[in-house]
Image: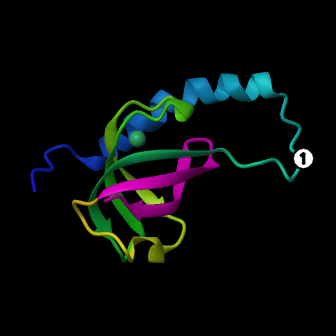
Amino acid sequence: MSHARPVSTLILTCALGLSVPLLSAADNHHHHGHTGHAALTAQAEGVLEAIDQDAGTVTLSHGPIPALRWPPMTMDLRLRDAALADGVAAGDRIRFTLEQVGPTDYEIIELKALD
Ligand SMILES: [Cu+2]
């Protein structure tokens, strides 16, 4: 393992990069707080770097995610359900779906290994 870069710094970078576009998108959207609004989700591919079963998180390297305006990066993400990591292992190429759960907060709601 050669994880020289602290993951927390990378998450912060990710969140900072997101805050401005998300705020302006919210302004344009005229959101009135009604329920039943579809959650923002995005699908992407990457490499699973590590699984933390106890914390319910994974570390992954993902390619660009245009829907979120994310550049390629390595980051930690929370699993909606820890069982999502049952069929995958560190080093697997994966496809995953993120759902936005807060202003700069995302959870993995689907995760599966690619061939
Ligand atoms: Cu990221």
Residue at (86% x, 44% y) in the render: 33
Task: Give the SS element for disc 1.
Answer: loop
Quadrant where the C terminus lies? bottom left
- Residue 27, image x and y in percent? 76, 24
Q: Quadrant of residue 89?
A: bottom left
Question: Exactly how many numbered labels are in the figure?
Answer: 1
Please, is residue 47 above or below residue 53 in the view?
above
Above or below, comparing residue 28 to residue 89 in the picture: above
Magenta region: 93-115
Say left or right for 110 vs 59.
right
Front residue of 64 and 100: 64
Mark 1, ligand 1, within 8 Å: the answer is no
Residue 57 highlighted magenta (yes or no): no
Above or below, 109 against 44 in this view is below
Query: Residue 109 in magenta?
Result: yes
| Dominant secondary-structure state across the stretch colored magenta | strand
Q: Which residue is mark 1?
A: 34
In which quadrant of this rendering is ligand 1 seen? top left
Say whether residue 62 is left or right of residue 21. Answer: left
In the rendered image, which quarter contains the N terminus?
Answer: bottom left
